[in-house]
Amino acid sequence: MHRYSANTTGAIYMMLSMAGFVLNDAMMKLVFAQLGLFQAITLRGAMAFVLMFLLCWLSGGLRLSRGIGETIGQKMLILRTIGEVGGTFFFLTALQHMPIANVTAVLQVLPLTITFAAALFLGEKVGWRRYGAIAVGFVGVLFILKPGTSDFNFFAIYALIATGFITMRDLATRQMPDFVPSTFISLITAGAVLGFGLLGSLTETWVAVGPASWGLLAGAASILMCGYLFSILAMRHGEVSFVAPFRYSILLWALLIGAFVFDEIPDAWALFGAALVVGSGLFSFHRERLLARKLAISTASSAASSLSQ
């Protein structure tokens, strides 16, 4: 496939993936009007676990080529699972009490927090320009959340905590050994979220689930799986540096669904903050692309120099 058509295909897959994630969030937000948080997490988690188990089984993900054992893979799997569980709880709690576009906008700072955490914990080199982009991104988050004003929602703190857990999850994913199948990792984390939901549901009074809620839960689980599938396809089509920025289309989907489904329209300050977050993220992607190109040129020059000697 020609490079440009591959990039276009990857971008479309990425936008479809983001639409799937927002639709999942919207369905869960609608479910919260009928069910408690933990009951909703448990029921959606059970459906997602069954779907992931079938996918893992059909793809051969249950047959590890070698046991994880006492390796870094085991430690990273534990950290990733904690990140997934914590991120799910804090994100869905924030989603339950905040406009969907605002919560989504806060999470768009993730590429920046991952860059910062990778520099802090993994020793990756980050220049002053990208540190500047990280600072601008966090200023954008402050505009969205507006701490110290009457518009501030306490559950906005939950959205920030969720970004911390998801950052931990993604960093742990980076460190997972290649021999551990992605489907197996997803199955373990899906099971952990289900178990967490079951434990939490002991603190709630379960209510009867109506046909509408069952439909929303089934739709959320199925669309979430589609979102993950399209995100994988997006990364396998085209150049990552081209495709990745299209993840910010999630904010457009969130704005549309928030306006038409929940009658939620962010104010001018929140929109300005979202623009800062997205702009700083796009700049960070641009810098990473330039650095990757310089590294490729340098490697090619070194190889050519070695051959000529």
Image (cartoon, rainbow, N blue to C red):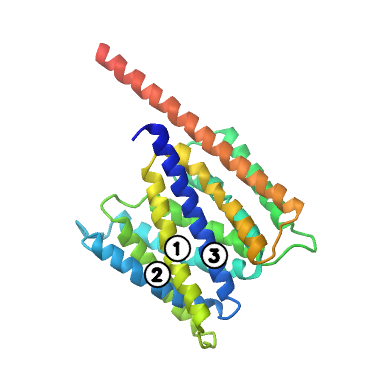
Counting other residues with Cα less than 10 Å from the Cα at mark 3, is it few (<14), some (14-19), or many (20 or more)? many
Which residue is at the far right? 150
Location of the N terminus by quadrant is top left
Q: Is residue 19 above or below residue 134?
A: below
User: Helix, strand, or loop for circle 2?
Assistant: helix
Q: Which residue is mark 3?
A: 25
Q: Is residue 88 above or below residue 175?
A: below
Point out residue 105 in the picture as x, y percentages from the top left corner: 62, 54
Estimate the spatial distance between the alpha carbons at disc 1 and disc 3, rounded to whole Å: 9 Å
Q: Which residue is mark 2?
A: 48
* Residue shown at 46% from the left, 61% from the top: 83
* Residue shown at 19% from the left, 56% from the top: 65
Q: Is residue 103 above or below residue 195?
A: above
Estimate the spatial distance between the alpha carbons at disc 1 and disc 2, rounded to whole Å: 8 Å
User: Helix, strand, or loop for circle 1?
Assistant: helix
For residue 31, which quarter of the picture? bottom right
Q: Is residue 214 visible?
A: yes
CB under 8 Å between callouts 3 and 2?
no
For residue 35, which quarter of the picture? bottom right
Q: Amino acid at mark 3?
A: Asp
- N-terminal label among 3 and 2: 3
* Residue shown at 71% from the left, 53% from the top: 270
The numbered dot on residue 224 is 1
- N-terminal label among 1 and 3: 3
Q: Amino acid at mark 1?
A: Leu
Q: Is residue 299 above or below residue 160?
A: above
* Residue shown at 21% from the left, 61% from the top: 63
Counting other residues with Cα less than 10 Å from the Cα at mark 1, is it few (<14), some (14-19), or many (20 or more)? many
Using residue 78 as the reference point, say whether residue 150 is left or right of it.
right
Q: Is residue 82 visible?
A: no
Location of the C terminus by quadrant is top left
